[in-house]
Amino acid sequence: MKMLPAIRVCVLLLLIAGRAAAQPDSNEIKKILRSHINILAAPNMHGRGYVNEGVELAAEYIEQQFRRYRLERISGMRSYRQSYHFSVNTFPGRADVALNGKKLVPGRDYLVDAGSPPFKCSKMRVAQKDISTYATVEEWKKAAADLDKKTIYLLQNADSFCKVAGIRASLLYTVLPQGCFIVPVKTKQSWTVAQDLADATIIYVYDSVLPANVTTADMNIESKVVPKYENFNIIGKVPGELKDSIIVFSAHYDHLGRMGDAVFPGASDNASGVAMLLYLAEYFAAHPQKFTMVFIAFSGEEAGLLGSAYFTEHPPFALRKIRMLLNVDIMGDATGGATVVNATVFPWQFSKLTAINEEHRYLPEIKTRGKAANSDHYHFSEKGVPAFFMYTIGGKGYYHDIYDRAEEISLNNMAGVARLLTDFAIQLQQ
């Protein structure tokens, strides 16, 4: 039946209004986000890592939410899960350190390098070694070959050596031989995930707790490499009118797990991003769009963007169908606004995003950033998919440490972020 122009316009306006249905008020959005963060960063999630099946527990929770929202599986997939494997070094038992008989607190007083092999000793001799006296890596390695294997070495001025030798401080393990080494540190250290064992066991101890003259050490570092740890990307969709036009929202749900008694909750990084992903999934499940909406919770991000790398090499649907991917990480506090990685790479899309923010004043500022391989968007944009990575600006700065807990997250302006992302996804379809 042929429509009159006025009727056609009215129908179009009704369709747009339906797709852009009002979102919950700010308090309700924050309540939803807070609920997910509290669960994902709780102690019984074990830091969503590779001890006590923490990452598996997080995957199960996300799947439960996808089922609750009635998200559909991707065609050809038997479940929400895309399975893959990688090697990972874990700390499933003790990670105890005592210097001169005084026991230190893991996570607070020291960090064990993530690639450290097991090491156990009782009242072992500690000797100091000023590593800054060596000008090159080759010179140091030659000297290190003669070190006493029955002695723990406290490496003085390791940061100065790294600068002179031209290596990153985080790569110190690559130039240390078998044995145990204590490295004093002044500034905040961040833990990580290692896939393989290093030669040396390295203990990074904060100067503030390091005895003036360390002579003996007691250690029990229990680490174990799991050569083929099964991981899952969790994928669901809300079908749209157009099956070959897809908007993807993504966030990584893995974190660092446990180091002995120390748990790394990962509330900001990235329980908060998963909470935002789940909020958006719930909203668009209740408000289907013209485009198909796909939601991906990646694992393996902390180990090197492994989940997104696997997805882009084994895509369950053609990547060319993706009109835009929006990856979210560190979504706990937007007091200072947000930053968008790839903003300069995809200027047309970024101009639409900033126009929405200027109209509604959702955030005080949206900063631009260029290309960076710092989250799961990277492998998509490398394949030619338009992709943004958004992270918020604000908070207390807890990152890859034991203090990144749910109670430290303010959720300032996060309702604005939720509305901005929703409006942007809807406008991309017009």
Image (tube, rainbow, N blue to C red):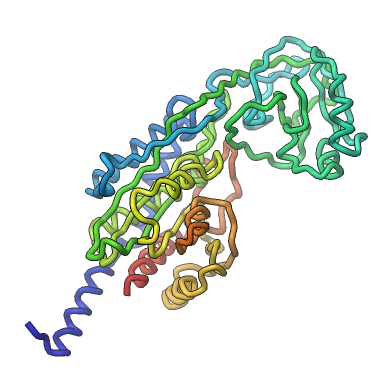
Question: Which residue is at a point 18% across and 83% down the rendered structure image?
Answer: 10
Regarding residue 32, the answer to whether it shows in the image is no
**28, above or below 146, in the image:** below
**27, above or below 8, in the image:** above
> Where does the image place residue 429, in percent across and percent down from the top left?
32, 71
Quarter location, residue 79: top left
Quadrant including the C terminus: bottom left
Left or right for 175, reference 262: right
Quarter location, residue 239: bottom left
Front residue of 385/343: it is 385
Quadrant including the N terminus: bottom left
The extreme top residue here reads 122
**6, above or below 384, in the image:** below
Left or right for 55, reference 287: right
> Where does the image place residue 129, in percent across and percent down from the top left?
88, 26
The extreme right residue here reads 133
The extreme left residue here reads 1
Question: Which residue is at a point 87% across and 19% down the rendered structure image?
Answer: 146
> Where does the image place residue 190, in percent across and percent down from the top left?
64, 40
The extreme bottom residue here reads 5
Front residue of 263/60: it is 60
Regarding residue 287, the answer to whether it shows in the image is yes
Front residue of 285/172: it is 172
Question: Which residue is at a point 45% across and 47% down the rendered structure image?
Answer: 313
Question: In this figure, what is the number of numbered marks?
Answer: 0
Front residue of 311/178: it is 311
Question: Which residue is at a point 40% across and 38% down the rendered structure image?
Answer: 232
> Where does the image place residue 418, in percent across and percent down from the top left?
39, 61
